[in-house]
Amino acid sequence: MHPRRLISQLSRPVHHETEFTPISRCLSVRSSVFPNQRGRSWTERPSFKSLVVTERGRRASSSVIPFSRGSALEPPPPDVSSFLFRQRIVYLGMALVPPVTRLILAEFLYLQHEDEKKPIYLYINSTGTMKGDKTYGHETEALAIYDIMSYIKTPIFTLCVGNAWGEAAMLLAAGARGNRAALPSAKSIIVSTVDIEGDIYHILKVEVLSRHTGKPPEVIEADIRRPKYFSPSEAVEYGIIDKVLYNEKSPEDKGLVTELKASQLM
């Protein structure tokens, strides 16, 4: 090529057509943008996406699901367990196995540290350490929870919302006096889960039930040799609970919500 022609081509201004990717496209890209070290593309998990309008009127993709309450948009509600815990409600809803015991002890200690004057609400629906003929835990699990209930200064209000069998009935009776309750369909059973007469855990269970029900140890000893069933009204007479909370449709009560608030169980 002639030198003059080469110089003239080099001196021409070069116009590059640069294409800018809109922000909305960048936000909606799911893969092949940020490859990882193995050469595969990062892919987000499938999620619901909603369109939001930016300041300039462009539409962008958002992975937040709006929660509608009236005319306001709010984020999704929290999980139920966290909501109950913020209301100082501890729910015992399964057999007393070691992981459950550790969680309940940690919740009791945390709630006492947060505010030792506000009561803790223990809702019980548990078969204790047994279910049928199978043993799921040891008596030490219930005794550990009972010791913490007696140790902390915070009052603990108990409510049976289903079943309270064996060691769970002992924890139900160990609540703050005057604030131990059960729903109309709840059932309570006291029974000894040890076969060796004179076992230390058997003796401790008799002492705990006698202390909180007001029954002599001899009566407790005779009653727990075989399963003894209680309806809510029978549990009140025996001293396991203090009152029965009725539902909204029952003529015997003004309403469950009213009774829960009056009993400071809600």
Image (cartoon, rainbow, N blue to C red):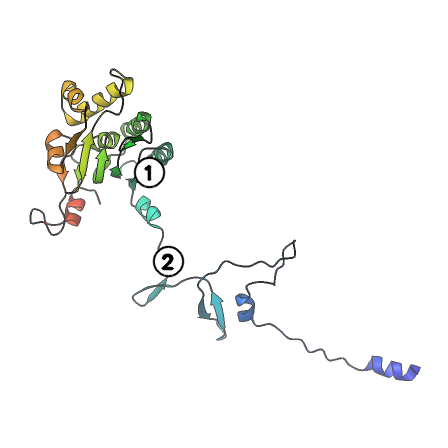
Give the amino acid at mark 1: Leu
Evaluate whether residue 129 shows in this view: no
In front of the other: label 2 or label 1?
A: 2
User: x and y percent of residue 87 in the render?
Assistant: 29, 45
Q: Is residue 229 above or below residue 222?
A: below
User: x and y percent of residue 152 in the render?
Assistant: 30, 30
Q: Nearer the viewer, residue 165 or 102?
A: 165
Q: Residues within 10 Å of mark 1 (few under 14, many from 20)?
A: many
Q: Quadrant of the N terminus?
A: bottom right
- Please, what secondary structure does the residue beneath circle 1 have? helix
Of the numbered discs 2 and 1, the one sitting upstream in the chain is: 2
Among the 4 quarters of the image, the one containing residue 135? top left
Give the residue furthest to the left.
251
Q: Nearer the viewer, residue 69 or 93?
A: 93
- Please state if 68 lies on the left or on the right of 243 as rendered: right
- Please state if 51 lies on the left or on the right of 236 as rendered: right
Q: Which residue is mark 2?
A: 76
User: x and y percent of residue 122 in the render?
Assistant: 26, 38
Q: Nearer the viewer, residue 53 or 219?
A: 219
- Please state if 114 lies on the left or on the right of 170 as rendered: right
- Please state if 204 lies on the left or on the right of 50 as rendered: left
Give the residue furthest to the right.
2
**Identity of the residue drawn at 16% across and 22% down:** 220
Q: Is residue 96 above or below residue 80?
A: above
Give the amino acid at mark 2: Pro
Disc 2 to disc 1, C-alpha distance: 25 Å
**Identity of the residue drawn at 88% across and 81% down:** 6
Q: Which residue is mark 1?
A: 111
Q: Nearer the viewer, residue 2 or 170?
A: 170
Give the residue furthest to the top.
198
